[in-house]
Amino acid sequence: MLDWLLSTAFTVDKTPTTWAEVLGFGTGVLNVWLLVRQNVANWAVGIFNVLLLMVVFATYGLYADAGLQVVYVALGMLGWWQWLRGGERGGRLEVTRTTRAERTVLAVVGVAATAGLWLLLDRVTDSTVPLADALTTVLSLVATYLQTRKKLESWWIWIVADLIYIPLYLYKDLRLTGALYVVFLGLCVAGLLAWQNALRARVPEPVAA
């Protein structure tokens, strides 16, 4: 099975694309589309997607991204439960915003984690992109954690991460994955707008006197 996933599905401009990339593309788009629509099934599709991407990233030397997929599986299970039972009185979770205290804590932890992971990748592995790999890893973890809690700001963090991921994957000749993240970028904008609308519908704007 692993050999088939790593085998070439097709070639674009002499650059091979594996079946793992192809399947990762399809499940990735489906995952984010379900997420935009607040469909809880996104977590099941997402878990399958990250297992596929783990194979791709490890093969191409993106070690932090490969390890990140293991954490994503755990976050996927957490998000699945939170969306079903994490709301008021054990009900469905609703879209909310992060507080100032939450943003401060996440910013401090994010900077520290990025610096530590950057040094680790630079000194322990043969990664050719340690800073970009570390930064996108931490941004993705923060964004996913916020999405398990249905926080609107998760989409902003994903947008920043995608703007870094796209040139990173193209640099690594992962062209299909790079194209996938272009699609993700568009879906993230759609998700931001959809969740903003959901939040406004639940919390009406105050009427001016």
Image (cartoon, rainbow, N blue to C red):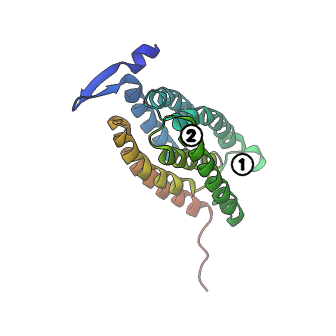
Q: Between residues 123 and 113, which one lies in front from this camera angle? A: 123
Residue projecting furthest to the bottom: 209
At label 1, the amino acid type is Gly
Q: Indicate which label's residue lies in the foreground, 2 or 1.
A: 2
166 vs 204: above or below: above
At label 2, the amino acid type is Arg
Q: Position of residue 160 (x, y in %)?
A: 47, 55
Q: Residue at x 27, y 24 (%)?
A: 10
Q: Residue at x 40, y 32 (%)?
A: 26
Residue projecting furthest to the left: 13
Q: Is residue 177 visible?
A: yes
Q: Between residues 66 and 143, which one lies in front from this camera angle? A: 66
Q: Which numbered dot is residue 56? A: none
Q: Mark 2: which secondary structure?
A: helix
- Taking 74 as reference, is 30 left or right? left
Q: How many marks?
A: 2
Q: Quadrant of residue 134?
A: top right
Q: Residues within 10 Å of mark 1 (few under 14, many from 20)?
A: some
Q: Between residues 190 and 145, which one lies in front from this camera angle? A: 145
Residue that mark 1 sits on:
87
9 vs 180: above or below: above
126 vs 133: above or below: above
Gap between marks 2 and 1 measured at Cα: 43 Å
Residue projecting furthest to the front: 123
Q: Position of residue 104 (x, y in %)?
A: 68, 63
Residue that mark 2 sits on:
123
Q: Mark 1: which secondary structure?
A: loop
